[in-house]
Amino acid sequence: MATDPIHQFQIKNFFTVAEAGETTISFTNSSLFMVAAVSIILAFVLLGTRKKSIIPDRIQSLVEMTYGMVADMLRNAAGNEGMRFFPLVFSLFTFVLTCNMLGMFPYFFTVTSHIIITGILAMLVIGTVIVYGFYKNGLGFLKLFVPSGVPLPLLVLLVPIEIVSFLSRPISLSVRLFANMLAGHITIKIFAGFIIMLGSAGIGGIVGATLPLALTIAITALEFLVAFLQAYVFAILTCMYLNDALHPSH
C-alpha cells in the first residue's frame, strides 16, 4: 500500500458535515488542503500588504510581483478593460499554484490531481465568459462563433466547428491541469518505490538504488517547475477566454 502510486490520490473522510437523504457531505482531506491553500493565500496577501512600504520587504515584493504578473497577463490578453476580472484571475492563479505546491510535500494531498476540482474551476471560467459575454454584448456575443468576412457557404461548416471548439475549452482547461499533476506524482511515486525495493536487496541493491534516487530528485525538481507552469497556463488561458467575453467578434 505504501508504494501504490494511486493510493496517494484517495479521498478520505474526516467527519460528516451534513446528510441529505442518501447524500452525505463530508469534510475530507481534499477539503482540508483547499482550506489550507486559501488560508496560505490570505496570510500571504495580508502580510504582504500590511505595511505598504515605499521600500518593500521580501513578502511585499513577492505580493507585488504576483500582482504585476497577473495584471500584465490580463492587459496583454484583454486590454485594460480586462482588469475588471483581476480578482477572479488572481484568485484562480494563486489557488491553483498553492494547491500544486502543497501537493509536492510528502504525505500531503494534491487537490488538483482530481478532475472534479479542475473541472469546477474550468466551468467557473467558462460560465463567467458566457454570462458576462451576454451581459455586455447581448446577442452580439454570438459573433464569437461567426468569423467575419467569411462567405456564407463556409459559415455552415465553420460555425459548428467554432461552437465545438468553445465547448471543448473547459475540458481541455481541466484535463490539462489534472493530467499533468496526476502523471507527475505517479512518476515520482514509482521511482521512489524502486528506491525502496532496491534498497532492501542488500549492498548491491543500495548501489543500484542510486539511479532511481537521482531520477526521483530530478523529476521532483521538474515537478516544482510544472506546478508553477500549470498554474500560469491555467491563468493565461483564462485571460484569453475572458477576452472573448469582452471582444467577441473575430
Image (tube, helix red, strand yellow):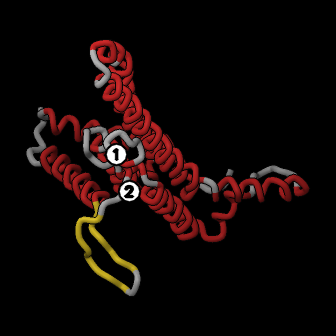
Q: Measuring 19% from the left and 35% from the top, which residue is drawn there?
A: 61
Q: Nearer the viewer, mark 1 or mark 2?
A: 1
Residue found at the far bottom of this picture: 21
Residue found at the far right of this picture: 153
**Dot 2 alpha-carbon crowd within 10 angstroms: few under 14, some 14 to 19, many 20 or more:** some
Mark number for residue 28? Answer: none
Residue found at the far left of this picture: 51
Query: Mark 1 — residue?
Result: 1
Q: Measuring 53% from the left and 70% from the top, which residue is drawn there?
A: 135
Q: Position of residue 26 (x, y in %)?
A: 30, 71
Distance Cα–Cα, label 1 vs label 2: 39 Å
Query: Which corner quadrant of the image does residue 73 belong to?
Result: top left
Q: In the figure, is residue 57 to the left or right of 61?
A: left
Q: Position of residue 13 (x, y in %)?
A: 29, 65
Pointer 1 or 2: first along the chain:
1
Query: Mark 2 — residue?
Result: 88
**Amino acid of disc 1:** Met
Query: Which corner quadrant of the image does residue 59 belong to?
Result: top left
